[in-house]
Amino acid sequence: MLKQNHRAWVEIDLSAIKHNVQQLKRCLSSETDLMAIVKADAYGHGAIAVSQAALEAGATWLGVATIPEGIQLRNAGITAPILILGATNSADEIKAISEHRLQPTICNPKQALIFHEVLSGIQHAIPVHLKFDTGMSRLGIDWREAVDFVKLVHGLPQLAIGSIYSHLATADELDQTIMQQQQQRFEQTIAALKAVGICPPRIHLCNTAAMLTDPKLHYDMVRPGLGIYGLYPAPHLKKYVDLLPAIQVKARITQVKSVVAGTGISYGHSFHAPTDMKIATVAIGYADGIPRGLSNRIAVAVHGKRVAQVGTITMDQTMIDVTHVPEVSVGDVVTMLGGEAGTTADDWAGILGTISWEVLCGFKHRLPRINVEVPELSSAYLL
Ligand SMILES: *Cc1c(COP(=O)(O)O)cnc(C)c1O
């Protein structure tokens, strides 16, 4: 197999991706589309393969952050509509969007007028998506100024309003006060638009957490990211769907050695062998995205056994305790995350004081993405 040549890699179970899309779709009515959010190389999972799997499992839209991310999918032959979630401001970007049939987000009158100018003379209007800021205070027109903004775009012949959307700041929290306030602002603005005769063809608001929390927020489309990768935005959301993490991180053992009690291991000797031990060196480190802050704090797996990582994680190499794995030898595969390691990105995030989204996006491109598919899983959920 291909893997034979790799020192370390990320393994993606595409049947888990499909399973997760199916599970999320089950929460939706037949009128609601699912846009798979595949920005940041599909949260580190590999955007092309994940997009193809998600579309096969019933997603109908894709969402990316940047224009190059969208172009990558078009170049791979993907024809589904692709929304660019980030802002687009320059003439070159607008031309690239039009050329690759990507669908931009527009957030203010100035941006709309740049599009109008750059696209003057085109035959067919291009679809644009208008973003309202209802409380996230990131991207989007302030909801109080939104009606005038939509009217302006409505009057520009080169632009066709494809959808209106907003993004929630606190959907993963148990307290829904702020989420409900954002929803009210969103619905109020849509109602005000209808009152002046503008009925957007599509409106959407939900990330993974919101779509699990409240079906009233589903509208015409939902935009899950994290759930597609098999992780829950918060523990209280586990009861709604049965998701499977799709990622495993693996690496090979490059050396096995015996050390006597008291031996210091790795930089700074942050670990001393309490007894005589057998230590294996694994060809993966923080330059691959194994955070150094996990040093001496995680379990990994080799030969189906969970063992402790010991000593400081270095740039390219990491040590593990294989004292109780007699069969271990050079070339053996160690599961650093997921699978037999029995850990998820949530566990690592908990240790590091961050969120699973950041852990997933942290695996570097030095690690090849290898796709596997478990046929029983695919057929069980897709047929
Ligand atoms: C990233 C993103 C999402 C997906 O969020 P998850 O919490 O990963 O489901 C949805 N909408 C927008 C605008 C985003 O930027």
Image (spheres, rainbow, N blue to C red):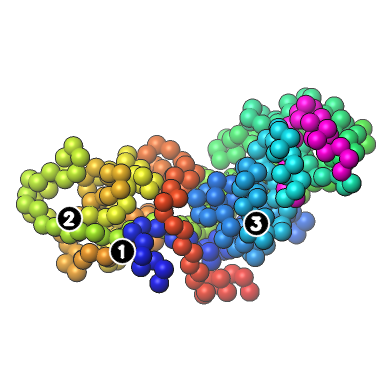
Residue 207 location in percent, x, y?
A: 63, 44
In what element is the residue under mark 3? helix
Q: In the picture provided, is 346 more to the left or to the right than 215?
A: left
Q: How many marks?
A: 3
In front: 33, or 314?
A: 314
Q: In the picture provided, is 67 more to the left or to the right than 98?
A: left
Q: As shown in the figure, which amino acid type bears the numbered disc 2?
A: Ile
Going 67% across and 55% down the picture, which residue do you hit? 74
Write down the region rendered in magenta: 101-122
Residue 80 location in percent, x, y?
A: 71, 57
Q: As shown in the figure, which amino acid type bears the numbered disc 1?
A: Val
Q: As shown in the figure, which amino acid type bears the numbered disc 3?
A: Asn
Splitting the image into 4 quarters, where does residue 354 fall? Answer: top left
| Residue 102 covered by magenta stretch | yes
In front: 207, or 123?
A: 123
Q: Nearer the viewer, mark 3 or mark 2?
A: 3
Q: CA distance from mark 3 to mark 2?
A: 45 Å
Q: Which residue is mark 3?
A: 75
Going 77% across and 56% down the picture, which residue do you hit? 31
Q: Nearer the viewer, mark 3 or mark 1?
A: 3
Q: Which residue is mark 1?
A: 333
Q: Which residue is mark 2?
A: 279
